Structure formats: structure tokens, C-alpha cells
Image (cartoon, helix red, strand yellow):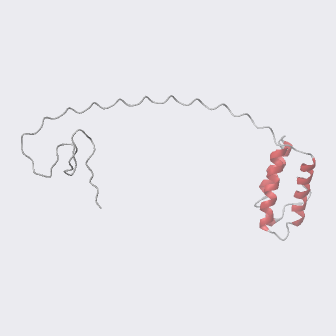
Amino acid sequence: MSDVPCPQSLLGVKTYFLRADELAKGGKPYVAHRLRKFGIELAMKVKGPDAGPYLLRQFDLVDQEKAANIKCPPRKPKPPPAPAPAPAPPPEPAPAPAPEAASTEGGKEGEGKEGEEGGEKKEEGGDEPKIEEVD
């Protein structure tokens, strides 16, 4: 990895640099480069007093990787989206209710016939309630 040993203050981020070395040797230079940069970012937040020489060595390695002009590996093409399921058929309309026979019993005034709400009177031949304008 490097000729400079990892200082005590950076033991928590040493794993990133070790893994970056493994990936660089394993044929994944782009991933190794990104991992090493991330490790440097974390190490700089630690601010260990003895971390300077070790971080400088990591910066040198990042510069060498950058000079090698590593490229991001091509992405695998996405598979085509699955076809959307066919829409469900619309529900069948409910059968119309059978008309009820008119009641022979007398009702109270103000009670409308069935279907009328609140005693509103309907115009003959129309389905809408009669609305009176108030000045």
C-alpha cells in the first residue's frame, strides 16, 4: 500500500484505503479511486495531529490514479420495461331498482315523495327542484 504507516488517529478510516488497494490490484481502478477519495474526505474530518504524512501519501496515490486517466466503466443497458398489465374491464352497471308502488297511506305535509329530499317540490316534467329567487 504505502511506505507510511497508518497513524493511530486514522485507524477508523484505514479500511477504506486497504480496500481501495485491493480493488486497484483486482482490476477495478475507477472504484478504487472513488473509494480512496472518500477515505481522504473522512480522514480530513478526523483532523488527527499525526495524520499529515499518511494523508499526503494517499493524495499522491489519488493523483497517480487520476493521471492514469481512469474512466468510469460503461453501464449495463437497462432491460426494457415490462409491458403494463391490461386494464381491468369496467364493472357492470348495477341493475335499476324496481319502482315501488305509491303508498296509499297519507303522509305528513312537508314529507316529500320518495326520491325527494327535505320536502322540496319538483316541477312537473322536470327532475330538478324549483329554486325561487330572493331579492
Q: Name the one closer to the observer, 124 or 60.
A: 124
> Residue 47: x and y, percent?
80, 69
Which residue is at a point 63% across and 32% down the rendered structure image? 81
Return the residue found at the far front: 135
Quadrant in the picture for residue 102: top left
Looking at the picture, does residue 114 appear above or below residue 90?
below
Q: Is residue 98 left or right of residue 92?
A: left
Looking at the picture, does residue 31 appear above or below residue 84?
below
Total label count? 0
Looking at the picture, does residue 35 appear above or below residue 86?
below
Q: Is residue 71 left or right of residue 87?
A: right
> Residue 45: x and y, percent?
77, 66
Quadrant containing the C terminus is: bottom left
Which residue is at a point 35% across and 29% down the rendered structure image? 92
Return the residue found at the far left: 105
> Residue 52: x and y, percent?
88, 66
Q: Name the one closer to the observer, 78 or 16.
A: 78
Q: Name the one closer to the observer, 55 or 129.
A: 129
Q: Is residue 131 left or right of residue 84?
A: left
Q: Is residue 41 left or right of residue 123?
A: right
Which residue is at a point 81% across and 39% down the rendered structure image? 73
Quadrant in the picture for residue 127: top left
> Residue 85: x and y, percent?
52, 30
Which residue is at a point 81% across and 50% down the rendered structure image? 34
Looking at the picture, does residue 110 appear above or below residue 72?
below
